[in-house]
Amino acid sequence: MNLTLHVWRQVDAGAPGRLVRYEARDVSPDMSFLEMLDVVNEGLIEKGEDPIAFDHDCREGICGSCGVMINGSAHGPMAGTATCQLHMRSFKDGDKIVIEPWRARAFPVLRDLIVDRSPLDRIIQAGGFVSIATGNAPDAHTILVPKQDAESAMDAAQCIGCGACVAACPNASAMLFTAAKVSHLGLLPQGQPERDRRALGMVTQMDLEGFGGCTNYGECTTACPKEISLETIARMNRDFRVATFRARPESAGAGSS
């Protein structure tokens, strides 16, 4: 396969960027998208040019670092697939492919296709953990969890923090990411002691990071490589409202005599 690439090149966050044309020759349909970029970079290095900078790590759809916009779609044309899992057989010989970084105010471009996704880390730091003292690991089935709750928690826990939901959302909202992190702990018994504080802390931090609001477009779940459901957002909104009510001073005296 021979392809024409239009790749976003930008030296750093303060420099202007532009799309640069490259020719990708003799690309095997069995290559992953990142392997194709590796081959292009090898050619650039041989010519003494700077290689295209892009994030990657596990290349198994686990770490979430590989995300880019491919022809305007987060992670490319295949549903439920991270960029590293996308194979070149998804394209045709002679195709033109536009490759850009995530586009969101909260994700400034660091270099070329690499963006700063540390705002997602700070959202997790605001409450995406369980800090109760659990002691030794309990025996199996000691803590009973309803099957539906366990399955929903596992579905939400699949989130790899790639940021595709933010990049795909017209509002650059991080609601699906935040909701997944709130939900997978809030559904389990171990997450109950901090449930209110978690919802309040993570939603507040999300707003502080400059992400947009959710208006239920649904682009986030379509772009998500793990296909996390919009139900997680509804669950987080419910937890946030309950936690906000409980945190009100007048609610502290409710029911007291």
Image (cartoon, rainbow, N blue to C red):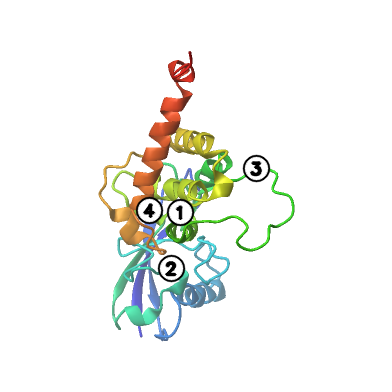
Q: Which of the marked residues, 1 or 2, is nearer the chain's N terminus? A: 1
From the image, tell me which residue sits under label 4. 165
Answer few, some or many: residues within 10 Å of disc 3's Cα (few below 14, many 20 plus, some between 14 and 19): few
- In the figure, 130 relative to 67: above or below? above
Q: Cα distance, mark 3 to mark 1?
A: 41 Å
- x, y percentage for residue 140? 63, 63
Q: Which of the marked residues, 1 or 4, is nearer the chain's N terminus? A: 1
From the image, tell me which residue sits under label 1. 10
Camera-side mark, 3 or 1:
3
The mark tally for this picture is 4
From the image, tell me which residue sits under label 2. 83
Indicate the amino acid at tag 1. Answer: Gln
Q: Quadrant of residue 81?
A: bottom left
Camera-side mark, 4 or 2:
4
* Residue farthest along the right direction in this orientation: 136
From the image, tell me which residue sits under label 3. 131
Indicate the amino acid at tag 2. Answer: Thr
